[in-house]
Image (cartoon, grey):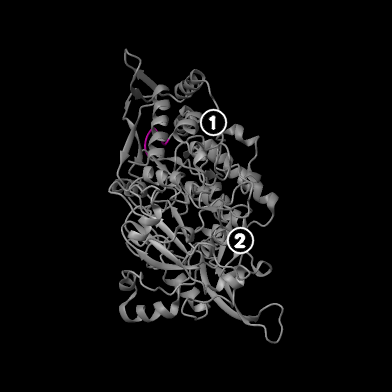
Amino acid sequence: MIGMKSILKTVVAVSATGALFGCGGEQQQQAAEGALPRQETLYLSGQQWGAPATFNPLAESWMAAWPVGGRFNLVYEPLVTYNTLNGQVESLLGSVVSELSNNDSIVVDLNPAAKWSDGKQVNSNDVKFIFANGSINTTEQISAIHVDTVKAEPAAEDAPVVERISFIVAKDKRNNPLSVMDLLQAIRIVPAHVFEPLVAEKGLDEVKKMMFDKNPVVSGPYTIKDYSANKIILERRDDYWGNAALHEGKLPAPKYIVHPIYKSNEHNTIALRKGELDASMSFIPRIGDLKSAGVHTWLNDAPFFTPGAMPMLMINTMKEPLNDKRFRRALATAIDYNAIRQFALSGYTSQLQPGLIMPTNLEGKYINAEDQKVGVKLDITDEAERLNTVKAMLTEAGYKSVFKDDGSLDHMENAKGEKIPTLFITSPAGWTDWESIVNIAVEGMRKAGIDVREGFVDGGQYWPAMGTGNFDLIMHKPTADVSPSLPWSRFNEVMSSRDWQKLGDWAGTNIGRYNQPGTKEFRPEVDKLLAEIPLMTDEAQKAEAYRELNKIFMEDQPAIPLAYLPEQYYEFSDRVWTNWPSAENAYAPAQLPWIASGTKVLWSLKLAK
């Protein structure tokens, strides 16, 4: 599955195969096993797929278990959250002071009501500690953090004192206020009064090895109750500061939240169908077939989900013939995108459009339909027409396809008559939707005369290959999280030459090594536009800049977008809990209620009658 990291365990009994017991005799089963009351427990899945390794908020995000790693707000909270429905930055531990924020600094007022579970107030020292010691490097984005104090509004004599924090944009480094906004909703604040003494005593590296699984000091609405290799259990904190400050005194509806740790997606699907699981962010084929079981999605019909991410084939532009943009454009034309949409992704994506901008309510304003004619044709539904188009493109570029007597492809030759080695698409084995996408892409390319094969590998090979450039083409989902910096961050990750690395050296962005500085093909306007867009305040100017950047992408085709997929899959059951957000009830984004702005769902859920 795309982007699956890990998943947690459930409170109800789990069989030897990992499937949950059925509903028959549920009360007796709960009593026998000491399970949690079903009417007080919310079961969520899709993030944790193995036993928890650590709940340490200083650990690398990929290492920390749910609900600590990633953008999870249930235990440790960020300063603000991002609402992917409307593009608004929403307050949490703090509030962005818009009238004081600009290209020089982003200003945040801490909420004076925010408190840790030990009763101490959340303060600027907590913020400065995690920005300096957390797993995310902030020094390229923020040059300094300044703190002032002001009276809360209205500034009455008894108004509380508010700490005002200014995050100074690192002008001599990234000079990017957009990425500073990303950091404010991506970094979870930790209690410095807990961690600073430990770091002073043991050192930061040793502290990062600690588990922090017993009675952690947290700011969020839930805390860790228990966990095993089968599940992670959270318990509601009735003294959570945000109940009064943000939710009019209400408590979150579920007293407990459980993340079952299933052995496979199939077990996840079975539990959702039975009503033993309330919501999931897992890939479930043919989700429409589960409607009769009370399983729903954001949209009632295809594509069922809202787009938020763009999986694509990243191309190693350092290798022949992939260094030829004419060849790359032929590759992109050869793929049957309609087949990907229907068969690999169960109709979960709308018609793909040329370019690197998604046609969503947040990004669509930057798309220019006339410019899309620069891109290759992605909507050819007639196979013969598509194959003939690709063959003509290859011939014009000087490439020859050699077929066997039975009509199957034997090999390719370049303009010099030299045999071109078979190309491979690297992709993680076992990610079934990605495997299907790759199979369809390979089939289309080979039919058109392009010698490409599948290259499914395990994670131990996949991730190092991506970073070092040890691939021909590789499946990847750049900027998978919807954040304030999109679509800039997607262009940056695919096209930026600022941190260009040679093959063999680790690249965090531009893994395809596109637009190598110092070569005759280098296009300096790419990096110029990427540097200017984050500082633009005029929307018309910004739209024109995105238009130019998108045309360059379509001309050079350094990567091949394949579909529009949701930021996370979002499926929910109304068998036990109701009032889930949907397109018809859009009070929160299509996110599981542990992610970003989606957390507010917990205060709106209701028990089914």
Give the residue displayed 40% in from the left and 73% down from the top: 216
- 205 is within the stretch colored magenta: no
Circle 2/circle 1 CB separation < 8 Å: no
Report helix, strand or loop for mark 1.
loop
Would you say the magenta stretch is mainly helix, strand or loop? Answer: loop
Report helix, strand or loop for mark 2.
strand
Rendering coords of residue 65 (x, y %): 38, 60
Q: Where does the magenta region start and end?
A: 319-323
The disc labelled 1 sits on which kind of residue? Val
The disc labelled 2 sits on which kind of residue? Val
Towards the viewer: 249 or 141: 249
Rendering coords of residue 129 (x, y %): 45, 75
N-terminal of the two: label 2 or label 1? 2
Rendering coords of residue 11 (x, y %): 38, 58
Q: Is residue 11 visible?
A: no
Give the residue displayed 49% in from the left and 18% down from the top: 384
Mark 2 and mark 1: Cα distance apart in space: 36 Å
Left or right of 229? Residue 134 is right
- The number of numbered discs placed on residues in the rendered structure image is 2
Q: Which residue is mark 1?
A: 376
Q: Which residue is mark 2?
A: 89
Left or right of 491? Residue 510 is left
Which mark's residue is nearer the viewer, 2 or 1?
Answer: 2
On screen, 247 above or below 530? below
Which quadrant is the N terminus positioned in? Answer: top left
**Label 2 Cα neighbours within 10 Å, binned few <14 / some 14-19 / many ≥20:** some
